[in-house]
Structures are given as structure tokens and as C-alpha cells.
Amino acid sequence: MTVVFCVVAGTTERLDRFLADQLALSRTQAGRLIADKRVTARGKALRASALLERGIEVTVDLPDEAPPRSYTPSHAALTFVYEDEHLAVLDKPAGLVVHPGPGHWEDSLVNVLVGRGTPLSEGSSEGRPGIVHRLDRDTSGLLVVAKTDAAHRRLATAIERREVTRVYAALVWGHLRKSPVEIEAPIARNPKDRKKMTVADGGRHALTHAAVVARFGIADLVRLRLGTGRTHQIRVHLAHIGHPVVGDREYAFGGSRRVTPSERRAAERLEELAPRQLLHAAALSFTHPVSGERLALVSEWPADLRPALADAAGDANLLAERNPLQYLGFFASDE
């Protein structure tokens, strides 16, 4: 199949990114089309880094559809907070990669769902059946998956229109000077490490709403609501404003070493108690794509992060508290 389109924007991002956005492809799929010389303009194959001019006509030769990929079933315990024949919302544990990829072809969430017998939508990108949005491997919390193509399309549209509210809890180093605050900074791939993201001119627009829920000695418990959904967005934005997530190994920006020397030992102890980044997808609300019912779901602070939270708060009661976020007033915060 051949697709032809004319560029109407005054300027565009580099071709691989622009093509992915225009044709609802993954960056990998777009890059493969370009590398196979299937994307041309004026009779010449285009490079992935090409910037397109207004009025240029681009031709994309799409290969015949490949047969559906099979996924190796895997088995792991999952907790579901909502499920029907159209979709499911699960409380993703830390350490679980969402979709198959290098090093995780057989043990991703998709593989576990297949092993469970959960029907999944075809998905908007190859290798990501049912996946409407993602959580980083070491981020726990609420994640919605689509069981039908119709539910997937409607949920994806709702996310694009910012009609899905995704709220995260994070323990961050230091104290935010202003609360609430909007963090608006473009995000792009880090040119020095393609596995990481960074704030950079020319990156994709990104917006995070942040508010302090509780202020502790050397850290704040922060409530974060996504305005956009870029890769590693919350972690990159918090590091950008000087308050990286406690326990974040990739965007630490010094971690405990940022803390004043008089508090350094307490900071090092907190860091030692952090088994991973202290970031959790705690609330998710959206309109059901079929029934129209409004769903508002919550997930409490996970057990593996409780010792670090209790230490930061200087409150040993949090270790025994079944609902520490509720105890601290997190869910009573304004949207």
C-alpha cells in the first residue's frame, strides 16, 4: 500500500519522528521504512534526519501486512482493580516491563497477559497489543490495557485529548520553592545516551503539574499529574527543576550528595532504603470508552517503598499504616 501526503506545516521535526506521528507508527517502524528506502520525495529516498519543507509531497511505500506476531505466554501474579470485556486496569508491580523488547521478549506484561488468557487489542504499534499507555519498568501503579480494538482507539483518543487523568506520587529530594507548579519543558532523546531522555530545545512539548502533599526534613512527597505523556517525563521534569526522584538511578543528578553536609547521613540512609525510584502511579480516572461510566481508581503506596517513606517522614507509624497515602492526605489533594 502506498500513502502520499503533503506537508502543510511551516516546519517539521526530523523525518523519523514526524512520520511516526503522522502515520501512528512507532519510531522503530518509521525508522525501518526510511532505512528500507520506502519514504521518498521528488523521486529520492529521504534520510531519517531530513527536515521537510512546506508543500513537499512525501510518498510512503508500506509493505504488505505481516502475519500477527505470537507471544510466548508467561506467568506472574497480577492485581486487577477493574476489569470487564472491553478493558482492564491493573496495579503493575515494579520490575515488570510493559511490552516485549530486547532482553524481555518473553517476560513482559504482554506475555503475562497472554499467559493469563486475557484478550488484547491489536494495538497501535507492532509488538504492543493492548498497551494504551506505559509505565517504566521500575515504576509501579495503575495501568489500563485494552481488550478490543474499539476500546483501544477510544482510550488512545481520550489520552490525546487529555481526558484521562493520570496522577503519580513521588518522594523527591529537597523542597519545591513553589506549589502548585507547572513544569513545562520540551523532552528529547539524550544525544549522549539514547536510552535516556533530557530537556532540550526542539524536543516534544511536555507538561507536568506538581504539588507538594507533605514536606519532610530532606524530601517532599509530591503529587504529579500528567499534562502530556512523554517517555520518562516525570523523572526528567523533576530532575530538571532540581528535585529528582529519590532512588532514581538514571536521573539522580547527585542524589543524596545534593543534600547539605549537615543532613548528608540522613540522606544516605534514605537512599539506602530506596530499592528503586520512589514513583508510583497512584490514581487514574477516565470515562469508560463503551459504557460511558466514569471510573476513578486509586492504588496505595506499595509495600517495598514504605520503609523509605517512613524514614523520610520521621514517622515509624507509616510502616504499619495500610494506607499511607490516604493517611498523608494525598488523595484529598485538588485535581
Image: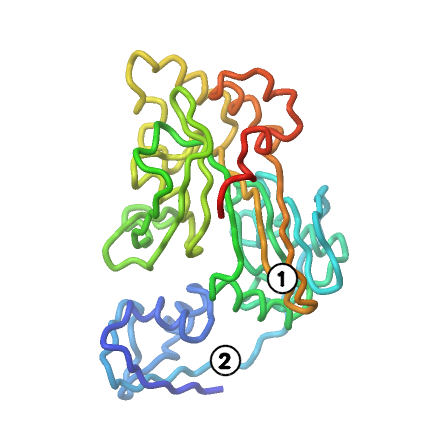
- The reply to whether discs 1 and 2 touch (Cβ–Cβ < 8 Å) is no
The amino acid type of the residue labelled 1 equals Gly
Asked whether 321 or 231 is in front, the reply is 321
Task: Tell me if residue 63 comes above or below residue 202 in the rendering.
Answer: below
Q: Can see residue 244?
A: yes
Drawn side of residue 208 relative to residue 286, left or right: left
Residue wearing tag 1: 130
The residue closer to the viewer here, 318 or 302, is 318
> Residue 238: image x %, image y %?
36, 40
Q: Earlier in the sequence, mark 1 or mark 2?
A: 2
Q: Nearer the viewer, mark 1 or mark 2?
A: 1
Locate residue 275, reporting x and y percent. 52, 28
Judge by depth and name the residue closer to the eye, 295 or 128: 295
Give percent across and percent down for residue 149: 64, 71
Q: Which label sits on residue 308? A: none
> Dot 2 lies on which element?
loop
Q: Residue at x 54, y 47 (%)?
A: 103
Label 2 environment density (alpha carbons within 10 Å; few <14, some 14–19, many ≥20): few
Q: Could one spot residue 138 in this view of the protein?
A: no
Q: Quadrant of residue 242?
A: top left
Judge left or right: residue 70 versus residue 207.
Answer: right
Q: Name the mark on residue 63.
A: 2
Q: Position of residue 189 (x, y in %)?
A: 33, 53
Q: Nearer the viewer, residue 182 or 244?
A: 182
Kindly identify the residue that appears in the image at 33 percent across and 59 percent down. Answer: 204
